[in-house]
Amino acid sequence: MRDGLIKVAAGTPRIRVGDCRYNAEQIFTLMREADKQGVRILCLPELCLTGYTCGDLFLQDTLLRGAEEGLATVLEATKNLDMVTVLGLPVRHQNKLYNCAAVLHEGEILALVPKTYLPNYGEFYEKRWFESAPTGERLFPFCGQEVYLGSDVVFPCNTMPGLTLGVELCEDLWASTPPSVALAEAGATVILNLSASDELVGKAEYRRALVTGQSARLVCGYVYADAGEGESTTDVVFAGHNLIAENGALLAERRFATDLTVSELDVGRLDYERRRMTTFRTRLDNRMIAIPFDLEPTVTALTRPISATPFVPEDAGDRSERCNEILCIAALGLKKRLEHTGARTAVVGLSGGLDSTLAVLITGVAMKMLDRPASDIIAVTMPCFGTTDRTRDNAVELAQRLGATLKRIDIGEAVKRHFKDIGQSMENHDVTFENGQARERTQVLMDIANQTGGLVIGTGDLSELALGWCTYNGDHMSMYAVNAGIPKTLVRHLVSFISGGKAQEDPALSHVLSDILDTPVSPELLPAVDGRIAQKTEDLVGPYELHDFYLYYAVRWGFPPRKVLRLAEQAFGRRYERPVLLKWLNNFYRRFFAQQFKRSCLPDGPKVGSVALSPRGDWRMPSDAVAALWLEELEGLE
């Protein structure tokens, strides 16, 4: 429960139709197993105390009495379980019968929630026995307790801010206006659905789409528990298709089995997203009744997958699709800018590193979209004091293989003259020594763009912008920044994707791209040592895979440092010790706050993913904001 995480489960018990005593025992067995696994919210199927397929037996007093007695047995057994359990049973009230979800906690029935939409088509005949959810005062005695009966109820947790439960049953989700919409608008962040959905060819895919889609639409967690083994197979079969989804993502799924489907919901993440989305409607004037409950706060053990590369899909097929999509988005952005300005050329500073490689590749795609020759790209390589033969040669070969117009301009003498003018010693390899080279390169690119009626294409990526790892008014500046929305971990995969695609078509181009991928990331601003790169970026600012992870969770989801660290430990496992994770997380927050002034005056560039730092769009932050609170939280974790 701490850090906004809570373990939930959808369970399918093995039942016998009409045998309420047996079913109650199976239900409690499943509850005890859920408790052992640390589950705090358990959702069980529709009418699981009796069986969904009882038919006209639902009208028999004997079955109804057995269901109530079975619930009493379960209630007694739950007194020592700190877990909310929701299960289905038929409930008689004022000469009417309702298909209900009983919400249980520590021996108490918090409420009985009746089904709103009763299917009466195809194989379903629920209106033969049941009434839709009633209106009006509905307190009545049941199982020795005074119980509320109604669908207009939510269940907030007093001990976990942001956690509020809402309940709907099976067909309710299939309806045009599911009750979960009103429940979410009344504050429910987790929707529990008790279902008995029979299995048909193709239905599982549709059901999965409904559950994940509703969780996305309502920005909620959605736990769907389906009836399974033991239901009558006279005409249909139930497969126990259990699903757990969160804001459009399927976290866990199980089918053709009885048992538990377990995962963790990140209620903190859902709460943040609802605050961020101004279109998510909260109805303060709603008529929902709130029935609160308490859970003992505990640390939730994580079993849900936490990717170490949140910007990069783990599946190879998904990754290729993502890469192709990003290339198209970025190239379309540049295409529009070239068209609008009437630019005759696109000028790219080509260093032989990953970022400038991706920038020139995207520019090449844009030129193809415009049906213009690659020679309209002016690739400028500008060796200086730290440039190695490897990067220089790769830059030259890349430009030649692409068919770009290549210019080689050694800026060493120009920089030396500038250093002489300002009194900078060539032996003093300080920040002035480094940044003087970056600004000279930008000046050269801008002037060539003026000469050729072109635009300077920026090469800096999203990760560098987050860390401020760019020279102000040097590589920080351009006329259109095509990489500005692409994090470093994704830059690598994009170049690799293009390299793989060119392997048959142009083996020489694929070879040079592969060598660029193998080259250490470096600005090459310090003199090389024995012809090798002396300045490795990740030795100075930290591993980009960590910074991209921190960027995703700290900026996209607004997680506090404590939670970012916890997720990093889960994602990276033994690859990094806790002190290393803490060191670079501290560095991330220090740099992110201190370097905002560079992001406040970024050139235009396309947003391609869910994280962007443009001051005109996603990220508005004062340049003099203080990181003290974030860093203090990290101090307490050392």
Image (tube, rainbow, N blue to C red):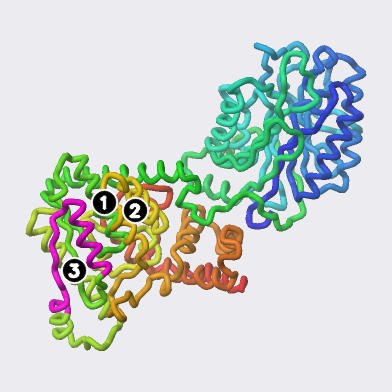
Count of numbered circles in the view: 3
Q: Quadrant of residue 544?
A: bottom left
Gap between marks 2 and 3 measured at Cα: 22 Å
- Disc number for residue 264: none
Gap between marks 3 and 1 measured at Cα: 18 Å
Q: Main secondary structure of the magenta part?
A: helix
Query: In the rendered image, which quarter contains the C terminus?
Result: bottom right
Q: Which residue is drawn at the image coordinates 61% and 34% (left, top)? A: 286
**Tag 1–tag 2 contact (CB < 8 Å):** yes
Q: Earlier in the sequence, mark 2 or mark 3?
A: 3
**In the rendered image, the vertical position of residue 310 relative to residue 636, given as above or below:** above
Residue type of the residue flagged with mark 1: Leu
Residue type of the residue flagged with mark 3: Met
- The spot of residue 235 in percent (x, y) is 73, 13
Could you tell me which secondary element the residue under label 1 belongs to?
helix
- Disc number for residue 361: 1
Determine if the magenta segment contains residue 392. Answer: yes
- Disc number for residue 495: 2
Say which residue label 3 marks: 382
Could you tell me which secondary element the residue under label 3 belongs to?
loop
The residue carrying pointer 2 sits among few (fewer than 14), some (14 to 19) or many (20 or more) residues within 10 Å by Cα, namely many
Q: Which residue is drawn at the image coordinates 31% and 68% (left, top)? A: 470
**Tag 3–tag 1 contact (CB < 8 Å):** no
Locate residue 543 relative to residue 306 in the image: left or right.
left
Q: Earlier in the sequence, mark 3 or mark 1?
A: 1
**In the rendered image, the vertical position of residue 493 relative to residue 380, given as above or below:** above
Could you tell me which secondary element the residue under label 2 belongs to?
helix
- The spot of residue 390 in percent (x, y) is 27, 68
